[in-house]
Image (spheres, rainbow, N blue to C red):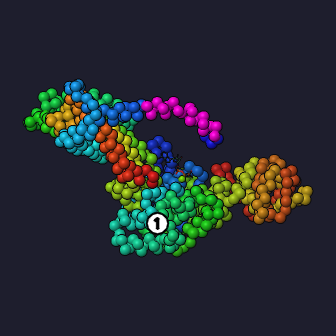
Amino acid sequence: MATRQTRTLARTMMAPAVIVLLIWMAVPLGMTIWFSFQNYSLINPMMTGFAGWGNYEYVIGDPSFTQALLNTLLLVGGVLLITVIGGTFLALLLDQPVWGQGILRILVISPFFVMPPVAALIWKNGFMHPGYGMLGHLYEALGLEPVDWFAQYPLFSVIVIVAWQWLPFATLILLTALQSLSEEQREAAEMDGANAVNRFRYIILPHMARAITIVILIQTIFLLGIFAEIRVTTGGGPGYASTNIAFLVFRTGILSNDIGAGSAGGVVAVIIANIVAIFLMRAVGKNLDA
Amino acid sequence: MGSITLEHVNKSFGEVEIIPDISLEIKDGEFVVFVGPSGCGKSTLLRLIAGLEDTSSGHIKLDGEDVTGAPPARRGLAMVFQSYALYPHMSVRDNIAFPLKMAKTPQAIIDQKVDYAARTLNLGSYLDRRPRALSGGQRQRVAIGRAIVREPKAFLFDEPLSNLDAALRVNMRLEITELHQQLKTTMIYVTHDQVEAMTMADRIVVLNAGNVEQFGSPLELYKKPANRFVAGFIGSPKMNFVDGPEAEKHKAHAIGVRPEHFTLSTTAGAGQWAGTVNVAEQLGSDTFLHVEVEGLGLMTVRTDGDQTFSHGDKVYLTPDANRIYRFDAAGLAL
Ligand SMILES: Nc1ncnc2c1ncn2[C@@H]1O[C@H](COP(=O)(O)OP(=O)(O)OP(=O)(O)O)[C@@H](O)[C@H]1O
Ligand SMILES: [Mg+2]
């Protein structure tokens, strides 16, 4: 791509894709911003016109917003914690030479192929339902009162489901990182008198730092927008106990038919995602340069 | 202290027997080199001693104590790997200090020992760098530094110089030899470079297909090779072998003559064997001639570098009668 001619050619060839992408992104974003400043409620069609910051004040001022923000952070943080620690642990186990390793790995990876609503339904009815879920039966067999997970621990239950879905991804990435550690380095550490715990702490963990960073970055992007799992299981409730920002936008815009306020919530969500992204890049991006 | 004894050590990977049966006694303070062709089991033997592989049968003793089942850390040996195996995310200082840290040595003593190692190996100005920012020779020195701070019973080197260029290799060879003289610790050194073996070793173990062919001092191996394999392996260029009627004249199945043990003449008839120069490799100090001898095949001959030869020149060779090696049908020296 050195000569002027090839550069012009490259630009011309890429232009359609870039333009489509730009329209694809810019038009909905522009429309959302536009709606967020309008009085636009399907329930009250007579109320129209410019709303100023009204929609924003309405969304942010509502106590449900603070709770949704907190829930979003708890959801992202909780899932990251479980998947990174659990993924590291599983990767260490899967790295051991065992019989049937290939099949075992496929089994571990399979939850990732289950669509979010399906996964949520399986958990909702198959495991966590107090009446006919497996956990309910287990509690009964032990002579305990079955737990109604989605009523008693709604956010925790959602975190468990989402973590189950993302654990394979983390495991896979971390396992690859683990396998790229040179055998000689492990052996050198062993000769140097490092026991298993110290080998993990001083040799394996620093080696995996980069992969862990990538897991955190990619997962955060997807976890900020978790929706299907909440929609299928708790519906954001009880109250707002398991409503995150994405689900709050849905509740305001679609369930309450207030397009204006919903759009304002959407814009706020985009801003929050960007703030999180900036912090994340600052905090962990360093690892990527090393 | 660091005497190492192997008693009937056997190693198999699954069905494949790599080391059938080796017994060796390495004395305290000795510099022993393992040489042999690629794949003969040198690294495997070294790793058995280190404890990185389990023996299939037999015993390994350190200072008389049986360590056959002991993990590497408990054996008190230090190993320098071919790829250096430095820890990339630690500074040079932390790399060298790592074994001490693992042994829970007090910080003051760690600092003192790291400084000593850095001075011995001229690493002073790199201590705060990462291994990535070092040259191959410097990395090698860090790896050696990491080994010496532990004051191990013995050092194990697995082809430590094979990634370095020729000039640096000569330097590091001298440094390791000096280090041995200074520390007087047992060293086992694996190489396939027989120049390294000859120059560094107190004693050499020649391995072939997992068997010890001969264990002796460099000159012993050169002068009295136990069999045809050792005779061919030690010495550069390789010994020339002749069998058939010419060998029967010496009452042997085969005879061997080293390239340096020929008298060479260009006068017609002034030699036992007549031949034609095929290739002449002129090194300046010496010239290696590859001579096609009638009825006997290709022979390598070493002469001084003063005379020049070219392809097709007629030469006449006389092997030095006192330095003809004789072998029986099984390849053993007679
Ligand atoms: N883990 C293993 N499993 C099966 N076979 C092995 C294993 N490690 C080594 N071998 C085999 O053992 C033999 C000896 O290997 P080793 O590494 O000791 O050779 P070497 O003498 O060090 O050779 P080189 O000079 O090329 O390093 C080889 O044939 C090799 O294929
Ligand atoms: Mg080897």
Front-most of residues A226 and B237: A226
Front-most of residues B89 and A255: A255
Please tell me whether residue B240 is drawn above or below residue A214 in the rendered image.
below
Q: Quadrant of residue B263?
A: bottom right
- The chain under label 1 reads B
Majority secondary structure of magenta residues: helix
Q: Residue at x 20, y 25 (%)?
A: A43
Disc 1 designates what residue? B128
Q: Residue at x 61, y 67 (%)?
A: B171
Percent coordinates x, y for residue A176 in the rendering: 42, 43
Please tell me whether residue B61 is drawn above or below residue A84 in the rendered image.
below
Q: Which residues are magenta?
A: A4-23
Percent coordinates x, y for residue B62 in the rendering: 42, 64
Image check: B134 left or right of A142? right
Front-most of residues A262 and A54: A54
Amino acid at pointer 1: Asp
Quadrant of the image containing the C terminus of chain A = bottom left
Quadrant of the image containing the N terminus of chain A = top right
Q: Is mark 1 within 8 Å of ligand 2?
A: no
Image check: B177 left or right of B97? right
Front-most of residues B292 and A214: A214
- Few, some or many residues within 10 Å of mark 1 (<14, 14–19, 20+): few
Please tell me whether residue A132 is drawn above or below residue B28 in the rendered image.
above
Percent coordinates x, y for residue A18 in the rendering: 49, 34
